[in-house]
Amino acid sequence: MRKLEKLQGKTILITGASSGAGRAAALEFAKYKTNLVLASRNEEALEEVKTECEAFGAQALIVPTDTSDSKAMIALANAANDWQGKIDVWLNNAGVLAAGDFDKTPMAVHEQVIQTNLLGYMNGAHAVLPIFKAQGYGTIINNISIGGFLPVPYGAGYTAAKFGLRGWSEALKGELSEWPDIYVCDLFPAFLDTPGIQHAGNYTAKVLKPAPPVYDPFRLARAMVKVAVAPSANTYVGSVSMLLKIGHAVLPELMTQITGLVMRRYLRSADPIALTDGNVFTTVDYGLSTHGGFGLPGEPKAHRKYMAGVLVAGMALGLYLMSKKK
């Protein structure tokens, strides 16, 4: 009831709302009869999400937008503000992925990944902050992912953007400390069962899959709702997320070596696939659901989480002991 009372009638803007975590967030917020502004590059998919959200009793406005275009993001913010006369929550979520050896992946691809994943979030905040300051309140939610702490070998552009996001957001929090009712909230989920990896630019020539355990995107969506109601500077979604952060903080070199080793071993045995730009430059017409089909929908089972933690810790300890023997 508390969430319904606090969220009903609020204007929530979500980028990347056409699939995956963004679509899940739209459906979750819709349950509280919010006013939803849905943005992504795929207008047809947004129309579907709009219909689904309205079935929950929410109002929805769709605004096809490329987040890497700063002028388009200003237009998005203005459209939302004109629609309801306010924006309560701006959810930066849109992102793309490209996988491959750094030197074999075109620089244009690395640049676009950074344009979308880093500058897209900055464009969003830059567009909405004048509105928040004028109205005296507002919440920016950044879906950063554990990739903000843990490097992703063979995803160097993605890692550059995510590390940059974390630093930019920390700087913004300090800058906005004189505005007590404007919040910047960062979310760090572990690996999600979304179609995002199916959309990835793929220069590995191998089928890509997320590393287990894979979390339900609705778990992240519920965390987004919780943060919208009670803002929190940093939220880790899933115990594996915190485990990976701590592991890299304690043994950064070894954790980086482990991630590289795991990726190489996987790519050696993965099935072949044609090279593709995926959705890096343009939207795609496949994989537009909330889930990607990589795991069972629902809450992750506790034993999977703890087994994964033991596995990562054991690998780190093993490599550490081996290095000490040399």
Image (tube, grey):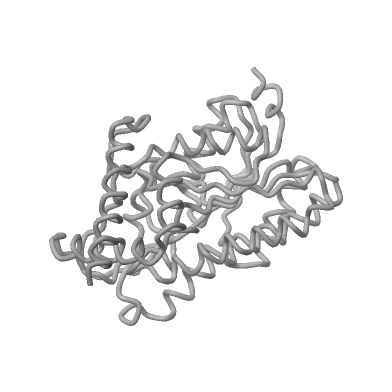
Query: Which one is in front, 86 or 197?
Result: 197
Query: Which one is in front, 17 or 47?
Result: 17
Q: Is residue 86 above or below residue 68?
A: above
Visible residue check, residue 286? yes
How many tags in the picture?
Answer: 0
Query: Where is the C terminus found, in terms of image quarters?
Result: bottom left
Q: Residue at x 68, y 43 (%)?
A: 89
Query: Which one is in front, 212 or 71?
Result: 212
Image quadrant in which you'd find residue 292: top left
Residue farthest front in this picture: 325
Q: Is residue 67 above or below residue 180?
A: below
Q: Residue at x 38, y 58 (%)?
A: 284
Q: Relative to residue 226, is residue 300 drawn left or right? A: left
Visible residue check, residue 201? no
Relative image position of residue 159 (x, y in whole percent): 45, 66
Relative image position of residue 167 (x, y in whole percent): 61, 63
Q: Is residue 116 above or below residue 290?
A: below
Q: Residue at x 35, y 69 (%)?
A: 277
Relative image position of residue 72 (x, y in whole percent): 65, 63
Q: Residue at x 65, y 31 (%)?
A: 34
Q: Relative to residue 14, is residue 107 drawn left or right? A: left
Relative image position of residue 220 (x, y in whole percent): 48, 39
Query: Where is the N terminus found, in terms of image quarters?
Result: top right
